[in-house]
Image (cartoon, helix red, strand yellow):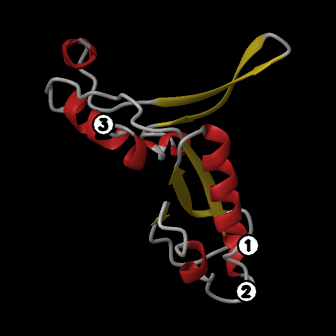
Amino acid sequence: MAASLAQAMGYVGTMAVEFFVSDGELLVNEMAPRPHNSGHYTLDACVTDQFEEQVRALAGLPLGEPTLLSPVAMVNLLGDLWARGEPRWDRALADPRVKLHLYGKKEPRPGRKMGHLTVLAASPGEALEAAQAAKGRLKN
């Protein structure tokens, strides 16, 4: 239904809106004309990821199944990790549950999102603990 409504209204793109709830108020943090990076975990943890869903919607195809397959945690990799050279990917990936996603940005800068790690596990807490531990092992 979303794809046909978008087509009927002449839309050729999508808009992601990041919200926060603070003191009972809904606040808009960011709007972006693309899938939002807070949902990148869908690449590893959902039947159909957010990127495929966007393509399906824009092409007027039936939407996929966004069901979460497993508890998951995602941690961002900021440019600060490169301060002492290339991060130790081998250390993070020593845990076979860790998935590494780098965005192909050429210049790491402090605070710049360069990629993320995701971990699927039996519980959200276990996934978060493993993801944070893997990130900690990246430092030189």
Identify the mark nearer the N-term, 2 or 1: 1
Q: Quadrant of residue 136?
A: bottom right
Quick check: 51 above or below 83?
Answer: above
Residue found 64% across the figure and 47% down from its top? 126
Q: How many C-alpha atoms fall within 10 Å of the one at disc 1: few (<14), some, or many (≥20)?
A: some
Quick check: 70 above or below 115?
Answer: above
Q: Which residue is mark 3?
A: 47
How far apart in space, not on screen, are marks 2 and 1 (Cα)?
12 Å
Residue 9: x percent and y percent? Answer: 25, 13
How many dots with numbers? 3
Residue type at mark 1: give it.
Asp
Residue type at mark 3: give it.
Val
Q: Which residue is mark 2?
A: 140
Q: Nearer the viewer, residue 121 or 50?
A: 121
Q: Quadrant of residue 139?
A: bottom right
Identify the mark nearer the N-term, 3 or 2: 3
